[in-house]
């Protein structure tokens, strides 16, 4: 927990994908103090997790933008108002503490807010683990599923496991900090962008197709790994400092089903104000079900703005749900803080 536990937030945003990030920006614009909680180690939701290197063509104002770049812009926009961000925590429970206070309980802590906006998309992501391999023993000690800081891999001998875009992209990206990279994949071909696969074959990365991870070894930290050829069973022992597993993610709405929200097969049922059936609890983005719903970034942005502005009017009935125009509001805010 980030020391945020004792505070009372105006709005707690569950999920830091595009809808949650834009919601956090809008909360700041409305003078609200937001907290964003996400189960992932990084902000950006599906864009960061599933397709960081793909172009998006249908976000207003951007004829084409890389998913990763859109997340950077959204984070920059949201951070102007210094929201508190808690990562790597899955929200498990949503409880009414008293007439005005809602409590969001994660696997690691609890946070209190006057309103909640659920922007949980397809649900919380968890990295897929390799069944039957002793990787869990070494998580945080050389085995990882994300690269938070490439510098931690500088000059290290890295073993990357996987054959999709994520594994291939990381093999190429990590070349910026180390040239000692081995990529293993259980199949004979990669399921990544053709262009990335071509770059991979032209790169100094050692590629071992038809190979799988059998075991990780080391004392306090990863020191080596055993891999095997799945056609012959032939084993090989590699001296490595780190193992990066990129074999995909699973998503689950899981705990959200137990929050007493009206749901249908598309997600959380909301009104035109993005209200759920629980007072003070709103939802936006892919997680919502409403007539005409489209699961797109563009619609999530609009829904997040609607949800947060109505949450503002909920916690402060004297304020309007319509915020006015940012072109008027922001210069006034800047004048006031001068
Ligand atoms: C391959 C691919 C390509 C796509 N291309 C496009 C495109 O070109 N244009 C377009 O508009 N859309 C595209 N989409 C869809 C788009 O990515 C989604 O509409 C968008 O990500 C939804 O945003 P969101 O913020 O609602 O949810 P998400 O992006 O899913 O983010 C939800 C976040 O909530 C977190 N979360 C969920 N539950 C919990 C919990 N209990 N506790 C804590 N955190 C939680 C998750 O970890 C996640 O980070 C694409 C999707 C895919 C998979």
Image (cartoon, rainbow, N blue to C red):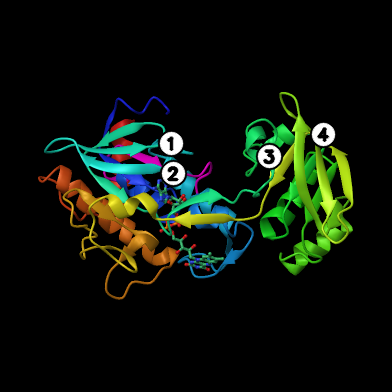
**Left-right relation of 309 to 231:** left
Q: Which quadrant of the rendered structure holds the N terminus?
A: top left
Q: Position of residue 303 (x, y in %)?
A: 31, 61
Instruction: Verify whether residue 30 appears in magenta.
Output: yes
For disc 1, the neighbor class at 10 Å (few under 14, some 14 to 19, many from 20) is many
Q: Main secondary structure of the magenta part?
A: loop
Q: Quadrant of residue 302?
A: bottom left
Numbered disc 1: secondary structure: strand
Q: Position of residue 63 (x, y in %)?
A: 55, 69
Residue 155's label in the rendered image is 4
Q: Position of residue 31 (x, y in %)?
A: 27, 40
Give the mark, 4 or 2, whose residue is nearer the N terminus. Answer: 2
Q: Position of residue 264 (x, y in %)?
A: 29, 67
Distance from the alpha carbon under mark 3 to that under mark 1: 29 Å
Question: Residue sitting at 64 percent across and 59 percent down?
Answer: 53
Disc 3 or disc 4, which is closer to the eye? 3
Asked if the residue at label 2 sits under 8 Å from ligand 1, the reply is yes
Give the mark, 3 or 1, whose residue is nearer the N terminus. Answer: 1
Numbered disc 2: secondary structure: loop
Q: Quadrant of residue 12?
A: top left
Question: Residue sitting at 75 percent across and 47 percent down?
Answer: 160
**Foreground residue, 290 or 56?**
290
For disc 2, the neighbor class at 10 Å (few under 14, some 14 to 19, many from 20) is many
Span highlighted in magenta in the image: 29-43
Residue 86's label in the rendered image is 1
Which residue is denoted by mark 2 in the rendering? 38
Question: Residue sitting at 33 percent across and 72 percent down?
Answer: 293
Instruction: Verify whether residue 236 appears in magenta.
Output: no
Question: Residue sitting at 39 percent across and 55 percent down?
Answer: 253
Numbered disc 4: secondary structure: loop
């Amino acid at each position: 927990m980030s020391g945020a536990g004792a505070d009372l937030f105006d709005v707690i945003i569950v999920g830091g994908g595009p809808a949650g990030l834009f919601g956090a920006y809008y909360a700041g614009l409305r003078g609200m103090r937001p907290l964003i909680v996400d189960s992932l180690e990084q902000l950006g939701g599906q864009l960061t997790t599933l397709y960081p290197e793909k172009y998006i063509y249908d976000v207003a104002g951007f004829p084409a933008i890389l998913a990763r770049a859109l997340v950077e812009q959204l984070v920059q926009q949201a951070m102007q108002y210094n929201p508190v961000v808690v990562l790597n925590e899955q929200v498990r429970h949503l409880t009414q503490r008293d007439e005005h206070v809602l409590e969001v309980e994660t696997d690691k802590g609890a946070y209190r807010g006057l309103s909640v906006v659920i922007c949980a998309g397809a649900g919380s992501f968890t990295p897929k683990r390799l069944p039957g391999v002793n990787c869990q023993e070494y998580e945080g000690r050389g085995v990882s599923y994300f690269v938070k800081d490439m510098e931690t891999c500088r000059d290290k001998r890295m073993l990357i496991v996987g054959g999709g875009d994520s594994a291939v992209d990381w093999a190429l990206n990590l070349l910026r900090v180390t040239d000692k990279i081995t990529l293993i994949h259980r199949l004979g071909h990669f399921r990544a962008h053709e262009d990335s696969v071509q770059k991979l074959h032209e790169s100094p990365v050692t590629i071992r197709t038809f190979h799988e991870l059998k075991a990780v070894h080391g004392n306090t930290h990863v020191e080596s790994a055993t891999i095997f050829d799945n056609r012959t069973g032939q084993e090989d022992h590699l001296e490595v400092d780190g193992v990066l597993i990129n074999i995909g993610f699973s998503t689950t709405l899981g705990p959200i089903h137990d929050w007493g929200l009206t749901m249908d097969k598309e997600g959380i049922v909301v009104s035109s104000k993005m209200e759920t059936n629980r007072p003070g609890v709103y939802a936006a983005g892919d997680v919502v079900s409403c007539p005409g719903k489209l699961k797109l970034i563009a619609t999530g942005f609009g829904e997040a703005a609607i949800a947060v502005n109505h949450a503002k009017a909920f916690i402060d009935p004297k304020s309007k749900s319509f915020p006015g125009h940012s072109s008027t509001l922001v210069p006034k805010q800047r004048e006031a803080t001068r």
